[in-house]
Image (cartoon, helix red, strand yellow):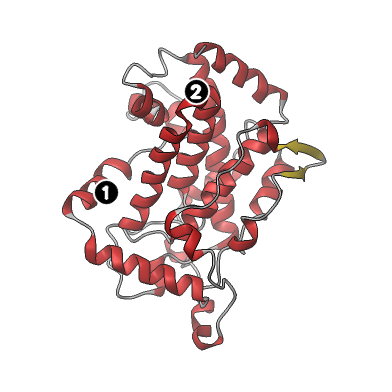
Amino acid sequence: MIKEIHTLSLVFLLAGCAVEAQKLHPLEEAKNHYASLLQLSAEPNAERAALDDIVFPPSDYSSGTLIYTMITPAYLTPAQVEELKRSIQFPANSSDQTKAELDYLLEWQEKRTKEQEDRSLNVLAPIGYWPHANVLKSHRRYEQNLEYLFYEGATVMGPNTTAENYPATAVLLKGITRDMRLMEFAVKYHLLRARPYHLEPKLDPLARISSPSFASGHTLWAYIQAFAWSELIPEKRQEFLNVAYEVGESREIMGIHYPSDEEAARILAHRMLSAMWSNPVFQEDLAAAKKEWE
């Protein structure tokens, strides 16, 4: 369960290779409402047992996202992908933790402002780099896709932080995000967690999503970017993490993700980067990107 994930060692064995997570900045402790929710039981509760039969409906599967489960990773090995995919689990639908998370989302629904709704839905929701839009420069979303790739860097370091100005950083971020998309949908379709509005009929989400809930893809993208950027510019780590937190929180404001989706994505992002650390190609790309920021 997610409570157990938080206590796992940061040095673990993946695909027969020891990954020394201490070479990375260590993962921060869970904060804010995540820390409180992790204290609740994630085990099934017999009083709400019927909820455990609910999964993300097959009729809502997206063919486009399913295809991403088939791509070749850039820095991870297939064995690492499989190991990481199975390293996280969500709280039972009937659990006390999930009930508290649904109540938390209902509270957001009552208190969210028009400004918060607009920013979550129209500013933060579209952001995210998609490898397929980078294949051809003639793709209608090619330029915007590159802008989104550098969203966190530009937010923290200014508008001149672009793929054109930092080409080695772009190579690194493209590889990391390629693996992130593979991992995102490998986990989602492995676990098939129902969206919060499938369990709680009182929820009125700002959008309906065509892939399972766990873990949050937006949050996985936001945190693996934040962790990578903070390896390039360590003194700005907290600022990058603040951007990632806002992205994750926006999915709760919209009523489309449980808080545990966000926290698991944060943990998985750090584990992914830890696993990549053993890849010589990743190290070469990281070194080249670091030179651009010296």
Where is the N terminus found, in terms of image quarters?
bottom right
Residue sitting at x 33%, y 21%: 158
- Crowding around mark 1 (Cα neighbors within 10 Å: few <14, some 14 to 19, many 20+) is some
Give amino acid for label 2: Ile
Between discs 1 and 2, the one toward the N terminus:
1
Residue wearing tag 2: 233
Residue sitting at x 40%, y 14%: 164
As helix, strand or loop, the secondary structure at mark 1 comes to: helix
- Crowding around mark 2 (Cα neighbors within 10 Å: few <14, some 14 to 19, many 20+) is some
Residue sitting at x 75%, y 45%: 12
Residue sitting at x 61%, y 39%: 26
Q: Is residue 70 above or below residue 1?
A: above
Residue wearing tag 1: 121
Q: Is residue 274 above or below residue 4?
A: above
Residue 273 percent coordinates (x, y): 62, 36
Q: Can residue 142 be seen in the rendering of this structure?
A: no
Question: Residue 186 versus residue 106: which sits nearer the camera?
Answer: 106
- Relative placement, left or right, of 97 versus 113 is right
Give amino acid for label 1: Leu
Question: Residue 62 versus residue 124: which sits nearer the camera?
Answer: 124
